[in-house]
Every structure is written in structure tokens, then in C-alpha cells.
Amino acid sequence: METTNSKVAICTGAGRGLGREMALGMERAGYVVAITAAANKAEIEAVATEASSGNIYPFLADVSDVESCVSLVAEVEAKLGNIDILVNNAGRGMRYVSESFLSQPTKFWEIEPETWRMIIATNVNGPFYMASVVVPNMIKRGWGRIINISMNHETMRRRGFSPYGPSKAALESETIIWAQELEGTGVTVNALLPGGASRTGMIPDGVAEEMRNKLIDPEIMVPPLLWLASHESNEYSGRRINARLWDSNLEPVKAMETASEIAGWMPS
């Protein structure tokens, strides 16, 4: 398969919501983008048809399974070339625990162990598997980007939000630890979050219209994502960027400084 000289990105879980908008945003900016879904290939094939350049490619892959991640990376590299950017977006939310999680929180001891394992496997293990497979080649080439999709600290602490909250807290810990371990390699690791509840499939269908109108548009992720994926962000690693605070009217470095803080948990 012939490709352009553009950098190659993988965006996991890109059939809808944040992943869909980020994949389309990267494609419009000139990236060659591999997008994944665990089971629904029709969904990601539909996203690929929206690409004006034809440079979005759908792949079925379950990020909670390490062999699936290894096979995905090998297939993407064979078809599209070296992977420059990994966007760890695939995630499972609270709807797997209960459709009424917003109005009737489930206590942690009431959660089915299999549901806990499934969410942790996707949200914590998945980014680890994907990053561990792509990073060695990035290090060899002296450049790469790992971008982990996170959420507000308030949601990590919210009553009734196990195991989704703990899974994203773990992802931020992964972000800051990996950033330190990759220091000096040319590979950066950062977390990016929308800054509040966003218009995605993680929000139950029965949510009141008043609340639904307040949901953040997933497109908000694109400007900071594109900057994080660029060479301009070489000096920034181990940060968490709040897309809601990103001001595109500012110079990108200034916008970054305004919208970001150190990833993980800071001492109070």
C-alpha cells in the first residue's frame, strides 16, 4: 500500500466520540491514521470513508489482549510504515457497570468482578500493551509520541465511579512514570483530557436534555492533540493537558502552559 511521507499515527477506539474526532482531525492535518475497534469494524470503516484524503485505515484489535496489540502494530507497520504517534483512546466506561450510574451509583462491592476486570484490562492494561509494543522502534528512530486520553481528577475521585475512575488515575500514573523513563530518547508521553463530560457513547441515552446540552463537543480535543503530535512539543513530556482550557488564539507554547500541569497526582 502506497502512503505519503506523512507521519503515521494509531488512534485506538476511534469508531465514535473522542476517537473519531481525533482521527479525523489528524487526517485533515496530513497524518496517515490507523484506527481501531475491538469488535465493530463497520463503525471504524464508516469513519475511514469520511477521510477526504483516504488516509484513515480501519483495523480490528482488542487492546486488552497483548497478542492482538502485537499483531496490530505489525500489520500497521507492514501496510503504512513506522508508527510515530500512539493515541491511547480506547476505553470502557461506567455504562458497563450500570446504565443508571449517574443517578444511582453502584457501590464498589456490588460490581461484578468480571466487569471490573474488563474495564481495567482495557483502560489500564491496553495503553501499557500498546505503548510497550510501539516504543522500542520509536526509541531506535529517536522520536515518537504517546498520548494517553485521561479525564478530570474530580471524576477519578467521584463516588460510584469504580472502576472507571481508578482506571484513569492509573493511566495518569503510567503517563508520568513512562515520561521519566523515556527522558532523553526523543519519545514523549502526555495525557490529554476534554475537561468535562463530553458527547460520547459513554453518556447514557436517558440523560436529561439540559445536561446533554452542556456536554463538551469532542472536536475540542483536536487543537491540543495536533500540537502534542508535532515536533514543536519536543520539550514537553509528563504533562496533562485540559483541552477545555486550550486557547487556540494563543501561541501553542503559551496555550500549553496555560492548559497543562504535571500528570498524575500532585501533593496537596
Image (cartoon, helix red, strand yellow):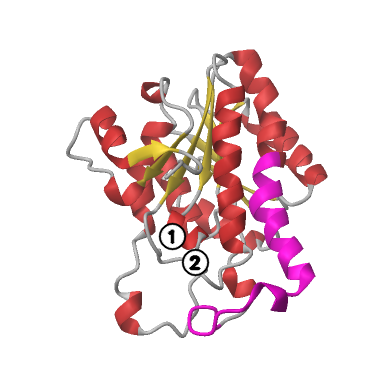
Residue 240: x and y, percent?
43, 40
The label number, if any, that marks residue 74 in the structure image: none
Q: Amino acid at mark 2?
A: Arg
Residue 112: x and y, percent?
75, 74
Distance of label 2 from label 1 (alpha carbons): 6 Å
Residue 164: x and y, percent?
59, 62
Crowd band around label 2 with a 10 angstrom C-alpha radius: few (<14), some (14–19), many (20+): few
Contact (CB < 8 A) between labels 2 and 1? yes
Give, as a single range, the part of the protein colored magenta.
100-128
Please tell me whether residue 123 belongs to the stretch shown in magenta.
yes
Residue 105: x and y, percent?
55, 79
Residue depicted at x 52% and y 68%: 202
Residue 165 location, quadrant? bottom right
Q: Is residue 157 above or below residue 27?
A: below
Return the residue at label 2: 158
Front one among 234 and 11? 234
Image quadrant for the C terminus? top left
Q: Is residue 106 above or below residue 15?
A: below
Secondary structure character of the magenta stretch overall: helix
Q: Amino acid at mark 1?
A: Glu
The label number, if any, that marks residue 154 in the structure image: 1
Residue depicted at x 44% and y 44%: 192
Front one among 33 and 17? 17
Image quadrant for the N terminus? top right
Name the element at disc 2. loop
Does residue 263 appear left or right of residue 181 in this picture?
left
